[in-house]
Image: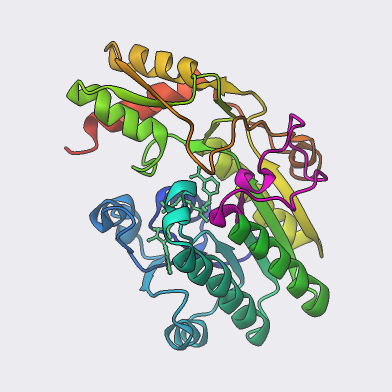
Amino acid sequence: MPENILVTGGAGFIGSHLCEALLAQGHKVLCLDNFCDFYDPQIKMTNISECRKQPNFSLIECDITDLDELSKAFSYYKIDLVVHLAAMAGVRPSIQNPELYEKVNVAGTLNLLQLCKIHGIGRFIFASSSSVYGNNAKLPFSESDNVDNPISPYAATKKAGELLCHTYHYLDKMSIICLRFFTVYGPRQRPDLAICKFASLLESGEALPVFGDGTSSRDYTYIGDIIQGVMRSIQYVQDHLCYEIINLGNDRGIGLLDMILNLEQVFHKEARLDFRVPQDGDLPHTLADISIARRLLGYQPRTSFAQGMQSFAEWWKCRLS
Ligand code: NAD
């Protein structure tokens, strides 16, 4: 396994769990993050508070769109492999601010790939998203499905990132895996995502906004299972010269109303629902075909939705203590 791993967006939801898993396996972790205010930067500091106590952990406060600062970090630190998670995430806000999404998710990704080329770093994992599938009529979503019809700027930037990755694989023989994550949930989930938002509303007794008639569904994937997939991808790019696009999902759809029912159960509260018209950019359904992840990585999601929601609720209840 590579020794020195740069995790961009390492203070975020997925990044902080990955940093912990890498440290536990004895890697040196370089966590790069700009602590942007998409949500409270203090939450991100708290996410990595345990990591910061460990000698193998370094924090680099840097913006991936600032090529000068990023170049200094690449010159200063020894880096064997990059896991690129830093991004402006979220479908709906990307419709309000597409320029920022393009700048961070496309130009920022290009900066990282170019610096990897300059510094001879040949292994790269890119966080893509199930949102690239757009209004795909066919379920489950397979990596071979056409993804030329994104329905949000966010999705378009993730597809662009995958294309840039392919270019660097082709021209510079970099080993790259683009992981299409499917709605990740669990402790430290981003506050803008539905489960977190609903937990907050449930706690304060407010009604939960349900966009559409409640029949939409998501392939919710537990954070621990996602980390298993990322760790296996790190091993895979180490052992193979490759360019792969791989779905990381759970391969079962959970309806929106079932998700709310689960929340009610773990919080022991009854929800009031406020039905509204569907929002632009939202996919009606997501469901991952994970046969490639199983075959290439030996990936196997293990956490039932009920277990995952229980862990989420436990974290939620003690997160401010
Ligand atoms: P997150 O917002 O919690 O983490 C992203 C981190 O990137 C944050 O800590 C943020 O401060 C940092 N960041 C943002 N802009 C930056 C910049 N210009 N320079 C440096 N750092 C910057 O989000 P997350 O949910 O952990 O998502 C991680 C990755 O996975 C993202 O690329 C996201 O698009 C992708 N993804 C997430 C999900 C999900 O369900 N959470 C689903 C699909 C894809």
Instruction: Identify which residue is drawn at 74% across, 29% down.
Output: 139
Is 305 within the magenta? no
User: In percent of the image, x 51 and y 42: which residue is there?
Assistant: 280
Question: Above or below — where is 316 with respect to 213?
Answer: below
> Is most of the magenta stretch helix, strand or loop?
loop
Q: In this picture, which residue range is highlighted in magenta?
A: 127-155
Q: Nearer the viewer, residue 249 or 210?
A: 210
Q: Position of residue 47 (x, y in %)?
A: 32, 50
121 left or right, relative to 224: right
Q: Which percent across, then down, holds residue 101?
A: 49, 63
Write the residue at 20% across / 20% down: 205
* Residue 29 appears in the figure: no
Q: Quadrant of residue 252?
A: top right
Residue 169 lies left or right of residue 156; in this view the side is right
Given residues 232 and 268, the one toward you in this image is: 268
Q: Quadrant of the C terminus?
A: top left
User: For this view, does 315 lie left or right of residue 99?
Assistant: left
Which residue is found at the position 71% from the left and 57% from the top?
177
Q: Is residue 173 visible?
A: yes
